Image (cartoon, rainbow, N blue to C red):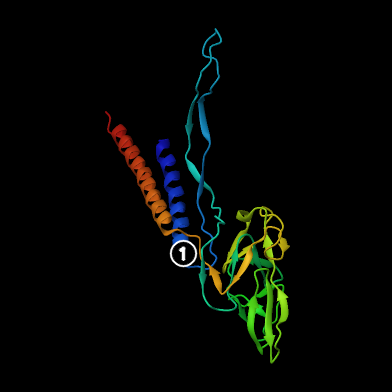
Amino acid sequence: MKALYIASTGMSAQERNVEVISNNIANMRTTGYKRQRAEFQDLLYQQITRAGSQTSGQGTMVPAGLEIGSGVRTISTPRVMSQGSVNMTERELDVAIRGEGFFMIQLPDGRTAYTRDGSFERDAEGTLVNSAGYTVDPGINIPGDARGVAISPDGTVEAYIGTDTMPTQLGQLQLARFVNKSGLESMGDNLFLETAASGAAQVGVPNADGAGDLLQNYLELANVNSVTEIADLIAAQRAYEMNARVISGADQMMQATSQLR
């Protein structure tokens, strides 16, 4: 009986949906996290009577065909790249992006990764790095005797060196934008990788050419809404239960058939 297999695809799809929702809820406090949503697609149809086929010698046609679907599948889990709220941290190397763009991070294997997580630190040489120790691109070195580090909305990094009374410019942070942000590949550690679907990175300075500006002493929070996620979780649970009931009903019908004499 096809109903068993059709309902099983529905249960499998809702199980994947719950997994996506649970990951969103788990990352509610992850800096710069962008929530995902599950998208579904119906499967192939069996055409029993095709719409528009002739029903008689007089040329009359079937106005609506007879077709039976074979279920559903999860087709993608795109990220919702909306702006998350920003939270003050009072740390001078914490930077939030307000608007479009990603920080660029140089990976040990030479690749460039992208992130919205601006919780930066200094390594032993004074180089600006992310929380995993990867260098922020372009490389910016902050001397050990630097004080009063300031990061302007356009990414300019300045500090007072030693006993200087005037600030010295140490470099400028840049942002990368993509035509299709949802096409970026997630690699964990709050990092994304460029793909053919995302398009090539468009690198520029903050607060120019459509790129967002920077906020020092702030971090961007996850764009996860707890109320929305719980509502989606309840809906997914109910959909799973309904598909389970279809399987139970189909099983009872098969049992009744096998008991016929």
Neighbour class for label 1 at 10 Å: few (<14), some, many (≥20)? some
**Local SS, label 1:** loop
- The percent coordinates of residue 230 (x first, y second) are 39, 55
Q: Residue at x 42, y 59 (%)?
A: 226
Q: Is residue 202 above or below residue 31?
A: above
Q: Can I make out residue 123 in this image?
A: no
Residue 187 in percent (x, y) is at 59, 64
**Residue 200 visible in this rendered orientation of the protein:** yes
Instruction: Farthest residue to the top: give it.
Output: 58
Number of numbered discs visible in the structure rendering? 1
The quadrant of the image that shows the C terminus is: top left
Q: Residue at x 28, y 30 (%)?
A: 260
Position in image of residue 119 (x %, y %): 57, 74
* Residue 144: quadrant of the picture: bottom right
Q: Is residue 177 rendered to the left or right of residue 49? A: right
Q: Quadrant of the N terminus?
A: top left
Image point 50% across, 51% down: which residue? Answer: 38
